[in-house]
Amino acid sequence: MSVKPKPLWRCPKCGARLVTRHMWHSCGRFTLPDLFARSTPPVLPLFRKFAALVRRCGPVTMIPQKSRATFLARVRFVSVYPRRDHFEAVFIIGRRVRHARLREVEKFGPQLYGHHVKISSAAELDPTLLGWLRESYHFYGRQERLAKKPVRG
């Protein structure tokens, strides 16, 4: 038996859809050109290719914010932080991945790990990254980890 998720709450000011009413968000209207204004010209087109890769995971919403762009399924599962000549993507999954491409791994809770990866070329938008993004999409973004049947002992 699976658990049906509660409806998302909509912020009356900006229209953001969030899991709970008290979830922090950046209430405002931002654009990708503004977000990437301090980056070199190739970074925004690279981000657009990354966004296409994320969309291969399933239905998503991309929201530009003041300092990042986020991708949401039911909840935000990938955040992108523009830098001068690249961007850093952070995705959340339920295990720690050890890989040379990962710059940092943060533990957010017993089963939540944020993985930081630097993206500076289209060659890095490969099947390995897509696999991590798909795992993040299902495990965290769609909250499938919460729909598992509880184990009774």
Image: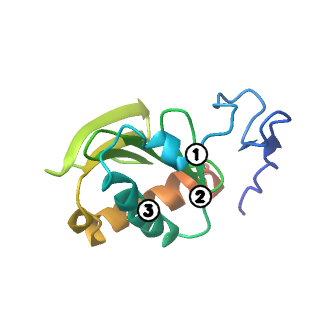
For label 2, the crowd category at 10 Å Cα-Cα, with few meaning under 14, some 14 to 19 and many 20 or more, is some
The residue nearer to you, when weighing 13 against 146, is 13
Q: Using residue 18 as the reference point, say whether residue 51 is left or right of it.
A: left
Q: Amino acid at mark 2?
A: Glu
| Residue lying at 44% horizontally and 40% vertically, measured from the top left | 112
What percent of the width, then of the height, locates residue 94? 42, 48
Q: Is 132 above or below relative to 69?
A: below
The kind of secondary structure element at disc 3 is helix
Q: Which numbered circle lies on residue 144?
A: 2
Q: Using residue 152 as the reference point, say whether residue 1 is left or right of it.
A: right
> Marks 1 and 2: in contact by CB < 8 Å?
no
| Residue lying at 62% horizontally and 68% vertically, measured from the top left | 59
Q: Is 10 above or below relative to 58?
A: above
Q: Earlier in the sequence, mark 2 or mark 1?
A: 1
Which residue does the numbered mark 3 point to in the structure image?
48
What percent of the width, then of the height, locates residue 140? 53, 51
| Residue lying at 33% horizontally and 42% vertically, measured from the top left | 39
What percent of the width, then of the height, locates residue 133? 41, 60
What percent of the width, then of the height, locates residue 104? 25, 37
Tag nearer the camera, 3 or 1: 1
Distance from the alpha carbon under mark 2 to that under mark 1: 30 Å
